[in-house]
Amino acid sequence: MIEHAVGIYIGLLLLSCVIAIATKMVTHLPYTIFLTLVGLGIGVLGIGPEIEETGFGHDLIFFVFLPPLLFQGAFHMNLNSLLKQFWPIICFAVPGVIVSTLLVGGVVGWLGGISSMMVAILFGALISPTDPVSVLSLFKDVGAPEDLKTIVEGESLFNDATGVVLFTILLKGLLEGQGFGFGQAAYEFVKVSVGGLLLGALLGWIVFKVMRHLEDHLLENALCLVLAYGSFWLAEGMHLSGVIGTVMAGLMIGNYGRRLSMSEKTIQTVEIFFESIGFLINSLLFILIGLELREVPGNIMWMTVFVAIAAMLIGRAAVSYSFYWLLNQVGTQRPKKWKHILFWGGLRGSIPIALLLQLPNEGVLVTWRPMLLVAGFGCVFFSLVVQGLTMKPLIRKLGI
């Protein structure tokens, strides 16, 4: 069984490489867009192995796939730039995600055919995290302002954390039948977030101190890998947020470690290593969601997909425009045209896909999981293909 599953994963990784080659040599589409199309093709055509044959489990997504993705994003984030844009980043990433979750959940629950409002809000949480990879690549091409790049990248880093924490709390309450008491949910959110932040910062600081006495790029790279997984696993074992723990650990190493204890060779080794892992994990996530979609019954209410896409855009627009206006009233004045980029550039990617795959087929979710899978993938598909392909014309039109 293990040999069979390993063989399947090697085949899936080979498929990922073929997709990347086709992207570079044939289509010239951004890799994430072509990957989304492949995931859709797998689901529609019913090709590939059965999902059970892969040995796929929900813990695989959470404990194996998420930590490197989070660490990679945090490692590249400049802390000084982040602190300079602290308030817009935090406003969009914490209260913004909460507001978006409630708005998306409310619209989907009201109009989308998901009669369980608790399940609808869970969907709002899993679809809220953004993925700016393709947008940041466009920013680099057009020479966008550094402050705008920092806001987009920083928001994504922390709204990933907020979205996953909300999703985890809501999923636990839903499966255990505890409901979503506001006071209890708020307390749990603050506890796991602050605890994960402190633990991640501590572990990152310890590894940074150890690395100051090392001059071995392979060993230091191995320590970064251990830190990425160790901070996540330890935090989760202590009933704290592994996501926030890994993000903070990555920020510590990516800033203090990079500046004070890592040679240029070590930095390049770590960056290339985690970029390679990120490429493989993102590829597997989209292929796995395609395999999951094969199992979805054909009588899914497609109106739910369109309502979910509309709800995602409504939630993003409400947060982007209202919070941006408020921030300009009480703080530093930023160009008004940036708000359009923040709205339309809030693409969804690997984190929502990972959370969709994390949904267990048990309890009340037995009924709603197929619909959530299709609606969630529909949102990601629209986001990466429609929004992704129209971002460059928008940036040019706004003169950014």
Image (cartoon, rainbow, N blue to C red):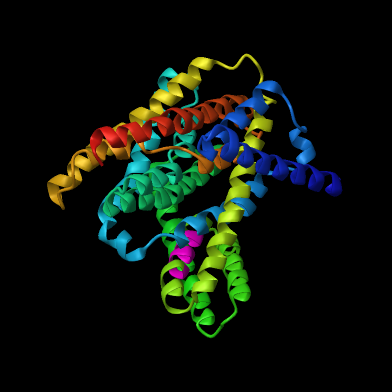
Give the residue at x 47% y 55%.
73
Residue 150 location (% of width, % of height): 33, 53
Q: Quadrant of the C terminus?
A: top left
Up-down: is 360 above or below 43? below
Report the residue at 26% width, 60% height from top: 84
Above or below for 44 versus 97: above
Q: Is residue 324 left or right of residue 267?
A: left
Q: How many marks?
A: 0
Q: Position of residue 331 (x, y in %)?
A: 15, 52
Residue 359 visible? The answer is: no
The quadrant in which residue 266 appears is bottom right
Q: Quadrant of the N terminus?
A: top right
| Residue 249 lies in the magenta-colored region | yes
Say above or below: 393 vs 65.
above
Q: Position of residue 248 (x, y in %)?
A: 45, 63
Q: Nearer the viewer, residue 109 or 226?
A: 226
Quarter assignment of residue 312: top left
Q: Position of residue 344 (x, y in %)?
A: 34, 34
Q: Is residue 273 visible?
A: yes
Q: Nearer the viewer, residue 305 or 13?
A: 13
Question: As drawn, which residue projects farthest toward the bottom?
Answer: 213
Q: Main secondary structure of the magenta part?
A: helix
Q: Residue at x 47, y 36 (%)?
A: 127
**Does residue 216 sit above or below 190 in this rendering?**
below
The region drawn magenta spans 245-253
